[in-house]
Image: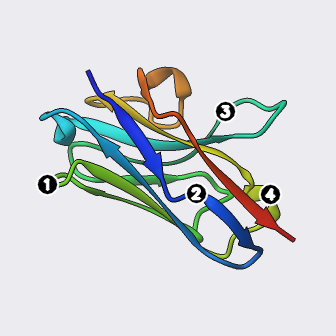
Amino acid sequence: QVQLVESGGGLVQAGGSLRLSCAASGRSFSSYTMGWFRQVPGNEREFVAAVSWDRGSTYYADSVKGRFTISRDNAKNTVSLQMNSLKPEDTAVYYCAAAFGTVAVTATVGYPYWGQGAQVTVSS
């Protein structure tokens, strides 16, 4: 079982930066693939970024590649999302997600564990 808690959301002007963090419970954190997803009202939850458990490979949605960076600290059981050059279309609730082992990293159905979400609002 994994418990996830996000922090670091807020309001920022377009072009600015925010850093989200996700704290996870459990001793097996290093065996979990970790991902970030986002959702706006009326839309499906969409993939943002992920980092694998085995080799730390990273994956990004085309819309955020080059602007966002995902990283994990297995010693602290945390995963972070550094968001730079933010755009109004990045406004959403951002969710941290975890899945045991190897998964289809871009698919929401592959992640059984989810955080409660952190609001990110980017003003134009």
Q: Is residue 70 above or below residue 41?
A: below
Residue 9: assigned label: 2
Left or right: residue 80 compared with residue 44: left
Q: Which image quarter: residue 39? A: top right
Question: As shown in the figure, which amino acid type bears the numbered disc 4?
Answer: Glu
Question: As shown in the figure, which amino acid type bears the numbered disc 3?
Answer: Arg
Is 30 or 122 nearer to us in this picture? 122
Q: Residues within 10 Å of mark 1 (few under 14, many from 20)?
A: few
Please state which of the two labelled residues, at mark 3 or mark 2, is closer to the viewer.
Answer: 2
Question: As shown in the figure, which amino acid type bears the numbered disc 1?
Answer: Ala
User: Marks 2 and 1, Cα distance to the nearest angstrom?
Assistant: 23 Å
Residue plotted at (19% across, 54% down)? 76
Q: Residues within 10 Å of mark 4 (few under 14, many from 20)?
A: few
Residue on which the image places disc 3 = 45
Q: Residues within 10 Å of mark 3 (few under 14, many from 20)?
A: some
Left or right: residue 71 compared with residue 66: left
User: Marks 4 and 2, Cα distance to the nearest angstrom?
Assistant: 15 Å
Left or right: residue 104 compared with residue 85: left
Residue plotted at (37% across, 41% down)? 34
Residue plotted at (84% across, 30% down)? 42
**Judging from the image, what secondary structure is the residue with disc 3 in?**
loop
Question: As shown in the figure, which amino acid type bears the numbered disc 2?
Answer: Gly
Q: Position of residue 33 (x, y in %)?
A: 32, 38
Residue 89: assigned label: 4
Tell me whether the residue at label 1 lies in contact with that at label 3, contact meaning CB atoms closer than 8 angstroms: no
